[in-house]
Amino acid sequence: MNLADPAQLVLKGEFQDRIVRSIHHLLDLNTDEMRREFTSPNDFWHWGADYMGRWISAMSLLGQYTGESYGVDAVVRELLGFQNSDGSFGPYTDPHDFQEWFGMSRGLVGLLEYYQTSHDEQALVAATRLGDFYLANYPDWAPCLYECYSTALEGLVLLFKLTGEAKYLETARRVATSCAVYKGIRYSKELTPEGRRSPVSGQVHCQLTTARGLLDLYEITREEAYLTPVIELHDYISNELLWVSGGIGFYYYRPEENETCADSDWLRLNLQLWRLTRDVRFMHLAEHILVNQLFFDQADNGGFCYLRGLQNRAGAVFDACCSHHAPRAFYEVLRHMYATSEGAVWINLFMEGKARLALEDGTLSLSSEIQEDSGAQIFSLELEEVPPTPLRLMLRLPAWAGQASLVVNGQAVALNNETGYARLERIWRQGDRLVATFPMAVRVTRGHTLGQHVLFPDEVAVFYGPRLFSLDDTLNPDIRLHLVRLKLPSSLPDAFRVSRNNRLLAMGVTPDHASEPLIFSPLSEIGGTPSGLGRIHTVRSPYYKVWIPLEADIPLPS
C-alpha cells in the first residue's frame, strides 16, 4: 500500500489552519532555549538531542508539504556539532541516564527523517555513528524509566532500511525483545524512595513510541511476535485508558490528564495499524482522535498541551516536546488521507483541498469540498485527471454517520459496503463528480467512562456528527456550569437544537430547580492562552466541561 505524498496535497479549512499555526509556533521556538540541553544542562533539564531532534523531524517533513525550508539545514549543522566522539549525544551524565538515552532516540529519528528529505550524507553519517553507539552500549535493563530507552526502535529500523546494514536490524531486534511493550509490562509495582515506579514507570508516550517501532519491525520482517504485543497494548489502552474524546492519559496510573505526545503517538499508532491490517476500526479511531483530542490539545498560539483534561484542566503548553510531536503526527495524517493499492484508491479522511495521487497506470488528480447542511456532512470529490483503466474508489463510511448516500454525476448509486468502505469501481472520466452525504445526529453517551469503566453513571457527553461538544463559560457566562445539570426530554431529538456555527442548544437545571438555556460548542474550540514561550507554560482558558450530570431521576431517552 502506498500513502499520499504530502507534497502533492494542497489543503484548506480547519486542519490546514492548525498545521500553519503549529509551523509558525515551531519557528518561534528556534531560539537559544532549544539548545539549552547542550549549552546549560542541569539535573532537571538534560534531555540531550530531544528538543532539537523533534524540531528537525517536524520541520523537515512539514517543509515537504509546504515547500518551505524553515532553516532546518542550519539546525542540523548545530546538532552535529554537539555529537560526542563515541557517536552519542548528551554532555551531562556519564554513563548516560534515561533522559539522554531518550533524547538520543529523538536525535536519531530527526537526523534520518532530515536525510530522507535532504539526502545530506553528513546527517546519515552522524546517524550511523549513533546507531553504532546503540549497538555497542544499549542496556538490557535500567533502574529508572526503562521505557525511555526503547523509543529508539523506530530510528534503528529506519537506519537499517536506509543503509541495508544488518547490524542495525539485529540491534533493533535486541531493543525490541528487551522492551516493556514486548514483554507486556505496563508499569512496575515497586516504588523508589523518590516515588518513581522502577524500572518501568508507566509513561504512555514512551510505550506508544516503542509500539510504533515494533510495527516498523513487523512490517519488514512479518514476524507476528512484533505485532501481537502492539495489538495487546492497543486493547489495553482502549479498555483501561481511553477518554471519550479519543485521548489517553499521561501515565497509566494518572489517566485524568494528558500529554499531547502520547495522544499523537496514539493517533499515529492507529494510522499504522490501519495500513498494516486495513481494519477500518483503526481509521475510525484515528479520525476521532484527530478532530476531538488533538485539536483540543492545541493552544491559541499553535503550541500543544500536557496535563490537560476534559473537566476544566487547561494544562500547560509543553514546547520542549508536545509542540513538536503533534505537528509530526499531522504529517502522518496528510500521508494517510489517501492511499493507493492494486487498482484502488482509499479515501480515508475528509479534508478540503486538492490531491494528486500516483497510480500503477497513471495519475488521479482530484479536488474535494465539505459542506454541512440540514443535518448532514456532504463530501464532494471532482476528478480532474484519471487513469485510462478501471479504478476502485474505496470511500470510508465514518462510524459517526447515519446511513450514507452516494451520487455520481447527479445519479444516485447503490452503496456497496465492503468492510466499512463504500466501493465504487468503473472507468472514471475527467470531470466526474462523486457526492457522499453522511447524516449527522446528536448522540449522547451515558456514563462518565474511562475505557470500559463507568466512573459516574449519571453523567453524559454530547456529540454531533464527528465532534465532541462541551459547555464553557464564554458562551454561558451567567450560569454556574459546575453546578448545572442537563435536562433531557423523553425524546432525544427534542433535547437539542442545532444552530449555526457548530452550536447545540439545550436546557439545563440549576440547584434551585430553575431552567436555564445551555449552549454547547465543540471541545476543539477551547484553545487557551499560554503564559510564555519555549518550554513549559501554563494555559489560561475558559472554564469548560465535557461530562455533564443529568437532572436527577430523569432516565436517558432513547
Image (cartoon, helix red, strand yellow):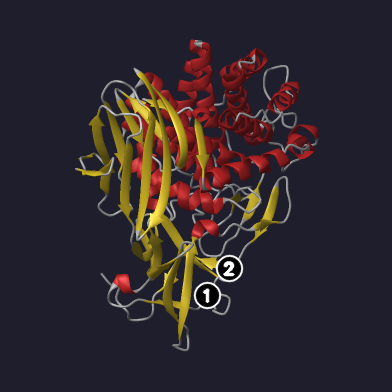
Residue 78 placement (x, y as % from top left): 75, 25
The answer to which of 151 and 93 lies nearer the viewer is 151
Q: Is residue 156 left or right of residue 214?
A: right
Q: Amino acid at mark 1?
A: His
- Residue at the spot 49% in from the left edge and 40% down from the top edge: 265
Amino acid, disc 2: Tyr
Number of the front mark, 2 or 1: 2
Secondary structure of the residue carrying numbered label 2? loop
**Residue 377 location (% of width, % of height):** 37, 53
Q: Which mark is residue 543?
A: 2
> As rendered, which of 327 and 261 lies closer to the eye?
327
**Label 1, on which residue?**
482
The reply, left or right, for residue 406 in relation to residue 251 is left
Q: State left or right for residue 379 relative to residue 264.
A: left
Which quarter of the image is occupied by the N terminus? top left
Quarter of the rendering containing residue 529: bottom right
Q: CA distance from mark 2 to mark 1?
A: 9 Å
SS state under label 1:
loop
Examine the rendered structure and indicate whether residue 228 appears above or below residue 20. Answer: above
| Residue beneath the point at 63% across and 58% down | 528
Q: Nearer the viewer, residue 38 or 178?
A: 38
Marks 2/1 in contact by CB < 8 Å: the verdict is yes
**Quarter placement of the C terminus:** bottom left
Could you say which is closer to the camera, residue 149 or residue 30? 30
Residue 82, image quadrant? top right
Q: Earlier in the sequence, mark 2 or mark 1?
A: 1
Give the residue drawn at x 67%, y 43%: 25
Q: Residues within 10 Å of mark 2 (few under 14, many from 20)?
A: some
Where does the image place residue 314, in percent across and percent down from the top left?
60, 60
